[in-house]
Image (cartoon, grey):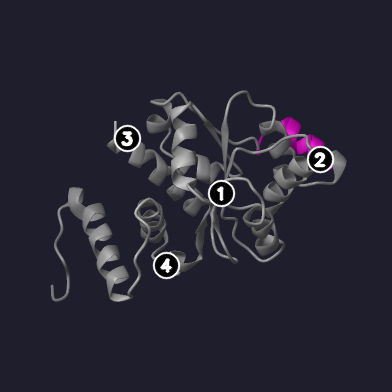
């Protein structure tokens, strides 16, 4: 059929990344080498080239996140969708697990009693985990706000934040809290994001480590 590109099933992802690279070049966009695999995977997941401009990385963010994974860091998400999308088999090679506390009965009950979101309580539960934790937030800005409030009170300091919640209420403001903090982060500025983007960032970090093993 005219215009159809025939690609073997095993080569589809490779060809997709080639197309992304070609289009970035056409747009005159050159990504920093350490950030490139992360940004390209987010574009691959979303088909949205705006992420090349809005995805923000703190200094040495990719290196710091990968060092945490090497040390056996767990990943905490704010949705079951993000949890499902993260490659748990690869993370387990480094001793880490993926957690999502959003659907736990105790979390739901406490959130109702305190008139706060489940994401708020989930972050408080996550703060009790032993060892290093990477937070991958793709849906709930209140998760970021909860982490920031704990940090401000001296209760807990997250070691790394992936902040890509999507939406309209407090989304932009919650992201800016961490952009203006000293916590290492990968954050997408603006309203865009989502659980799929959070998972894509985690997987880009994981696949880069796996490739270098």
Q: Which residue is mark 1?
A: 185
Residue 48's tag is 4
Give the magenta-colored segment's residue range. 102-112
Is 103 magenta? The answer is yes
**Mark toward the viewer: 4 or 3:** 3
Pointer 1 with pointer 2, Cβ within 8 A: no
Q: Which residue is mark 2?
A: 153
Spatial CA distance of label 2 from label 4 is: 37 Å
Q: What's the distance in space between the residues labelled 2 and 3, CA to CA?
A: 37 Å
The residue that appears at 79% across and 40% down in the rendered structure is 111
Q: Quadrant of the N terminus?
A: bottom left
Label placed on residue 210: 3
| First in sequence: mark 1 vs mark 3 | 1
- Residue sitting at x 45%, y 23%: 95
> Which mark sits nearer the N-terminus, 2 or 3?
2
Closer mark to the observer between disc 2 and disc 3: 2
Say whether marks 1 and 3 touch (CB < 8 Å).
no
Left or right of 132 in this view: 104: right
Q: Quadrant of the C terminus?
A: top left
The residues bearing labels 4 and 3 have C-alpha atoms spaced at a distance of: 26 Å
90 or 30, nearer to the observer: 30
Nearest the eye: 147 or 80 = 147
Left-right relation of 91 to 178: left
SS at mark 2 in the image: loop
């Amino acid at each position: 059929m005219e215009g159809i590109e025939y690609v073997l099933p095993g080569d589809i992802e490779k060809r997709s990344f080639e197309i992304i690279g070609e289009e970035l070049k056409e747009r005159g966009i050159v990504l920093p080498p350490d950030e490139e695999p992360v940004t390209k995977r987010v574009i691959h997941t979303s088909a949205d080239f705006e992420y090349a401009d809005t995805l923000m990385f703190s200094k040495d963010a990719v290196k710091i996140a990968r060092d945490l994974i090497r040390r056996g860091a767990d990943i905490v998400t704010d949705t079951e969708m993000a949890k499902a999308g993260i490659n748990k088999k690869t993370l387990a090679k480094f001793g880490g697990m993926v957690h999502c506390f959003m659907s736990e009965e105790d979390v739901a009950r406490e959130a109702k009693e305190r008139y706060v979101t489940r994401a708020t309580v989930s972050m408080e539960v996550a703060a009790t985990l032993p060892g290093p934790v990477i937070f991958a937030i793709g849906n709930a800005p209140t998760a970021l706000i909860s982490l920031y409030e704990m940090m401000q009170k001296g209760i807990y300091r997250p070691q790394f934040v992936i902040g890509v919640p999507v939406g309209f209420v407090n989304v932009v403001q919650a992201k800016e809290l961490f952009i203006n903090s000293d916590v290492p982060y990968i954050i997408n500025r603006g309203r865009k994001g989502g659980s799929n983007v959070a998972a894509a960032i985690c997987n880009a970090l994981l696949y880069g480590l796996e490739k270098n093993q």
